[in-house]
């Protein structure tokens, strides 16, 4: 127990130090995109976020950054802390504690936070509410939302999906239990977010007592999320939903589906993700409110907003650009499925 407390204190210290370093780096005017490129690759075609032209421009100066003494010192400190973190086995703990967010880049999330590309605050300067659309055309979606960083709620967008009648806790439980290797691959290659539960794996989460599943009195609440990377499961899931009608047919969509499921109250706590692309999320059941907060570099320019997503709606948001938290409304259990697009 004492060891665990000591370790937690060390992780806390480590976290604080990392966050401080990043704050200082930003204050000193370092460009996140440059730092990211320096860290992540020597491949200047690696892009992240929505405004690709801006990022390409930023790449020119990426090599200069290595000559900055401040950056050299920071680089050493970061690498040292990361090494300590990994040695302590703290990667996962730090990850859960600070972020619990989606991440496809296999590096410490603390580094992710330090090297996150700066958002283009112009896109949200005049935005006071999340736009709501119906019958959204592909052209309008592409022009106004797809890669601009402006979130959008599309009403009644899932009407012909059989997911609406099919997805439930029992459906996922049966699907995973009856598909060989599904739980194993989820544990090894996908992500599982326990949020306000004690579960460590999807298998545990899909093995609750009936009383808890039904939120009976005295039972602990639950809300969790996971990604699917099992081909067979993906096939089944995709037989129940389609690419949202407003996303162009030739857009490259991720093969990974994300599901979030649970009862009323806080869903995901406020966080920012480190995924390569913007996402859509369809509300299959229940009602959920998203709180959106601009990233720190935009906080004096852009406004925080919230939007309530009802059954049948699809919400599109760049989760790399907007801090987000979710709250499930009382009533029907909330079930969502989503993915990324390009
Ligand atoms: O649906 C939720 O509760 C959280 C979703 C989320 O964090 C995401 O899609 O990035
Ligand atoms: Fe997220």
Image (tube, rainbow, N blue to C red):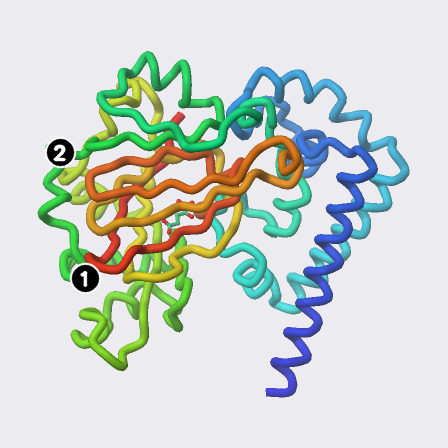
Residue behind label 2 places its C-beta within 8 angstroms of ligand 1:
no
Looking at the picture, does residue 3 appear above or below residue 68? below
Q: Is residue 255 above or below residue 19?
A: above
In the drawing, does residue 145 fall left or right of residue 314?
right
Of all residues, the one furthest to the right in this rendering is 69
Kindly identify which residue carries mark 1. 173
Question: Residue at the location (47% across, 46% down)?
Answer: 324
Q: Can residue 318 be seen in this view?
A: yes
Rendering coords of residue 290 (x, y %): 40, 46
The residue closer to the viewer here, 44 or 297, is 297
Query: Would residue 180 be seen by someone viewing this image from the given angle?
Result: no
Q: Distance between the residues labelled 1 and 2?
A: 24 Å
The quadrant where residue 30 appears: top right
139 horizontally vs 104: left or right: left
Q: Which residue lies furthest to the bottom in this view?
A: 1
Q: What element carries label 1?
A: helix
């Amino acid at each position: 127990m004492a060891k665990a407390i000591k370790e937690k204190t060390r992780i806390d210290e480590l976290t604080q130090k990392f966050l401080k370093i990043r704050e200082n780096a930003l204050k000193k005017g370092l460009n996140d995109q440059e730092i990211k490129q320096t860290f992540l690759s020597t491949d200047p075609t690696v892009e992240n976020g929505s405004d690709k032209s801006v990022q390409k421009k930023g790449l020119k100066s990426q090599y200069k950054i290595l000559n900055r003494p401040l950056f050299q010192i920071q680089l050493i400190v970061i690498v040292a802390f990361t090494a300590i973190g990994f040695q302590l086995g703290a990667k996962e703990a730090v990850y859960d504690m600070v972020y619990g967010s989606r991440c496809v880049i296999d590096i410490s999330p603390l580094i992710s936070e330090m090297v996150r590309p700066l958002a283009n605050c112009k896109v949200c300067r005049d935005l006071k509410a999340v736009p709501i659309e119906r019958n959204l055309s592909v052209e309008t979606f592409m022009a106004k939302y797809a890669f601009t960083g402006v979130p959008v709620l599309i009403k009644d967008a899932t009407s012909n999906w059989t997911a609406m009648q099919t997805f439930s806790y029992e459906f996922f439980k049966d699907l995973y239990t009856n598909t060989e290797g599904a739980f194993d691959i989820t544990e090894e290659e996908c992500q599982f977010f326990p949020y306000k539960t004690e579960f460590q794996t999807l298998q545990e989460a899909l093995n609750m007592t009936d009383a808890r599943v039904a939120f009976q009195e005295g039972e602990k609440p639950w809300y969790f999320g996971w990604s699917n990377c099992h081909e067979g499961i993906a096939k089944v899931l995709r037989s129940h939903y389609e690419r949202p009608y407003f996303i162009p047919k030739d857009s490259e969509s991720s093969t990974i589906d994300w599901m979030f499921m649970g009862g009323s109250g806080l869903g995901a706590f406020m966080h920012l993700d480190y995924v390569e692309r913007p996402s859509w999320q369809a509300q299959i059941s229940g009602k959920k409110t998203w709180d959106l907060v601009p990233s720190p570099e935009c906080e004096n320019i852009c406004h925080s907003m919230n939007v309530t997503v009802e059954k049948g709606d699809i919400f599109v948001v760049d989760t790399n650009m907007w801090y987000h938290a979710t709250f499930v409304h009382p009533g029907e259990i909330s079930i969502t499925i989503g993915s990324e697009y390009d």
